[in-house]
Amino acid sequence: MKQDVDKLIAGAFSGDESSLGCLLTMVENDDASVSRILEAVSSKLGRAYRIGITGSPGSGKSTLIDKLVAAMRSKGLTVGVICVDPSSPITGGAVLGDRIRMEQHYSDDGVFIRSMASRGSYGGISKAVGAAVDIFDASGKDVVVIETVGIGQEGIDITKIVDTTLLVLAPGWGDSMQLMKAGVLEVADIIVINKADLGGDGLADSIREILALSTRKSAPPVIQTQAFNNIGIDDLYRELENRRNEHHHKAKER
Ligand SMILES: Nc1nc2c(ncn2[C@@H]2O[C@H](COP(=O)(O)OP(=O)(O)O)[C@@H](O)[C@H]2O)c(=O)[nH]1
Ligand SMILES: [Mg+2]
């Protein structure tokens, strides 16, 4: 058994996708070998740039990820994507939506997409997602993207395991009081107003007003996109690329 795990670990590190998939399943099932996997992974961490993408259901996270991954692939970067599925395991609705939205990348060897169910305990899924990100990192992916649902306390807190947190909002999502209460604007590194075709200026103004009251050192950029029309993706990608370069510098100095 121990040898099997070592074989899978070696496989995943050398780019074998089925080994990688097995390790992710073991982590998701909280297998007895998890500590062994994490130990092996720990010596290879820090290379991947980690992006967390959060926001309410239907705001367009998966569509945005689809476009961002396309941009990353055009630069030759390899990508791991983890979609944390909030829906009931019976309907599997979100998994299907994510799958349809990212269809073009499933057949690409440079992209590995994995859905993880959020059933089970809260700490359970957070831990499993953290471990999955580390496994992607250690297996050599240049970028790891994590899609989670949730605003503020309702969501799992991914901000601690990623380098950059992107908050995706869409016009019509609540009012500014709700945004303030949720506190999400405080932790987001980049704020994306998707579905700008429905009119994003009002929401952008509210967000800037709230940010003006914030004690943050520097305000995060607010970027309007139309994910399904591929509009605004370049601007967003540029922001991410700048941050990835900074991350790279820091990683080299470590
Ligand atoms: N009007 C509009 N709809 C969009 C845009 N981007 C995505 N959508 C649609 O919004 C719906 C939810 O998108 P999805 O990416 O699954 O959202 P998620 O639940 O946040 O992952 C889909 O029907 C998309 O086609 C956009 O820029 N404008
Ligand atoms: Mg989605």
Image (cartoon, rainbow, N blue to C red):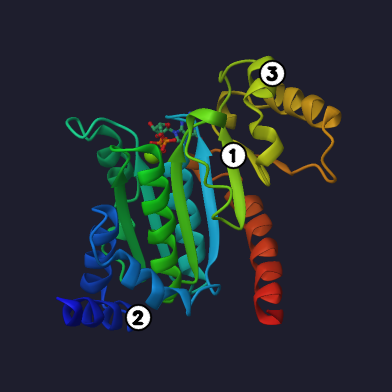
Q: Quadrant of the N terminus?
A: bottom left
User: Which SS class for mark 2?
Assistant: helix
Q: Which mark is residue 184?
A: none
User: Residue 246 is drawn in which quadrant?
Assistant: bottom right
Q: CA distance from mark 1 to mark 2?
A: 31 Å
User: Residue 181 is drawn in which quadrant?
Assistant: top right
Q: Which residue is label 2 attached to?
A: 13
Q: Position of residue 149 (x, y in %)?
A: 44, 35
User: Residue 105 is drawn in which quadrant?
Assistant: bottom left
Q: Which mark is residue 167?
A: 1
Asked if residue 200 lies left or right of residue 64, the reply is right
Q: Nearer the viewer, residue 239 or 246?
A: 246
Residue appearing at x 45%, y 51% in the figure: 146
Q: Earlier in the sequence, mark 1 or mark 2?
A: 2
Q: Nearer the viewer, residue 160 or 243?
A: 160
Q: Which residue is label 3 attached to?
A: 176
Where 134 sits versus 130, above or below?
Answer: below
Q: CA distance from mark 2 to mark 3?
A: 46 Å
Residue appearing at x 24%, y 30% in the figure: 88
Q: Earlier in the sequence, mark 1 or mark 3?
A: 1
Q: Position of residue 134 (x, y in %)?
A: 44, 65
Q: Nearer the viewer, residue 189 or 1?
A: 1
